[in-house]
Amino acid sequence: MKEIHIASSAGPVEITVTIGGAHFGRYRLMLWGSSGRSKPVGEGTNVDNIADVFYQNPRDCKGMILGVEFNIAAYGEQPGQTYSARIDLRQHDAAVAGSPLSYTGQLDGGVKAIIDYARLIVT
């Protein structure tokens, strides 16, 4: 499993979601604890006028797993289209170790679903 390293004393974790390739995309981010319970971080689309940026206190990340879900669809049916989706995690305007989580590839059939997880290590 991927690991993202967060400094406990470096201030809030800024999480930015980007969906590229001129496609429609929807995403959801969750924090999963060892008990199996989840807590939403944020969700949205790339076609509204709402910023796709979320903030987490480092202490709320300790021992958690970040769950990532993307659903991406093309506006047209042209063959050979590609997609991109990315999650950047930063503290004090600098990327944290293990960031970004980045996904790219062929948009086969005009749609792509991505599910991924990353362990958050707070030191």
Image: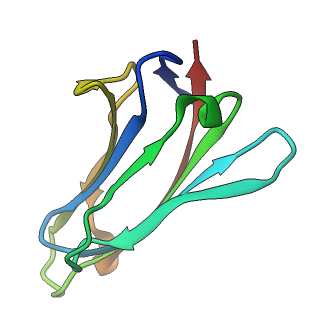
- Foreground residue among 98 and 79: 98
Residue at the location (27% across, 50% down)?
104
Q: Whole-percent x and y of residue 33?
A: 76, 42
- 119 with respect to 50 (left or right): right
Quadrant location of residue 18?
bottom left
Q: Which residue occupies the foreground of this view, 6 or 69?
A: 6
What residue is shown at x 12% (from left), y 81% (from top)? 78
Q: Residue furthest top?
A: 123
Q: Residue at x 15, y 76 (%)?
A: 79
Name the residue at the bottom extreme.
76
Residue 61 or residue 118, whichever sits in front: 61
Q: Is residue 104 above or below residue 120?
A: below
Percent of width and height locating residue 112: 38, 69
Determine whether, in the image, residue 122 is placed left or right of residue 82.
right
Q: Quadrant of the C terminus?
A: top right
Residue 107 seen by the camera: yes
The residue under the point 12% across, 71% down is 22
Which quadrant holds the N terminus?
Answer: top right
Q: Is residue 78 above or below residue 104?
A: below
Q: Is residue 52 above or below residue 9?
A: below
User: Where is residue 89 drawn, in percent x and y?
Assistant: 36, 35
Q: Is residue 113 left or right of residue 106?
A: right
Left or right of 24 in this view: 63: right
Q: Nearer the viewer, residue 20 or 109?
A: 20
Residue 112 visible? The answer is no
> Exactly how many numbered labels are in the figure?
0
